[in-house]
Image: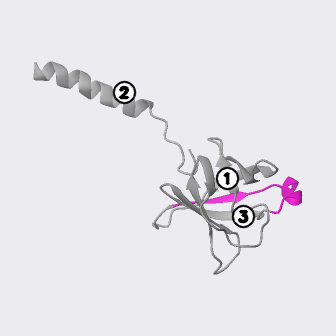
Amino acid sequence: MRRTLAVPAFAMVLLLAGCSEESEPITGEWVADGPQPPGFSDFADRAMIRVDKDGEALLGTSPMSLCGDAKVTAKDEDGGGGKEYRIAFSSACITVNVPVSLEVVVDGDTLEATPTGLQGGKPFRFRRAD
């Protein structure tokens, strides 16, 4: 009896493992987690980042000051703590006060974003909303 139950259970595990589509850790919606560093009025305490499965991002303060059409790219792994990405915005975002690009580290349900080129500044902190 055990053998008959074990075989279907093992087959089910293989089926589920083969069907699961692993998405990037950055995919989903992120909301500002506490007070944010100054400097970008549309990327402050109520800011959000939304990243879809195709690597497109939307950033800003919902619902009025949002900047879309951003591209998300994974950076090479260096063996550090979280998965690293870069979010770069198009020139269409010139009317919204957000960084031109962000260096992002995702570690579980926490996302830290630093404007590209900023040395020694405090990162923007986000938590997963979904």
Q: Name the spot of residue 28 as percent of width and height, x first.
A: 59, 45
Residue 52 in the image: state x and y as whole percent. 65, 42
Residue 104, percent from left and from top: 61, 62
Instruction: Give the amino acid type for the residue marked by disc 1 in the picture.
Output: Ile
Residue 46 falls in image quadrant: bottom right
The dot on residue 49 is 1
Taking depth in this image into account, of 85 and 126 the one nearest to the observer is 126
| Residue that badge 2 annotates | 15
The structure residue drawn at horizontal position 75% and vertical position 50%, both measured from the top left corner, is 62
Magenta residues? Answer: 83-97
Give the quarter of the figure containing the C terminus: top right
Q: What residue type is labelled 2?
A: Leu
Snapshot quadrant of residue 6: top left
| Foreground label between 3 and 2 | 3
Image mark for residue 44: 3
Please tell me whether residue 21 is drawn above or below residue 102 in the rendered image. above
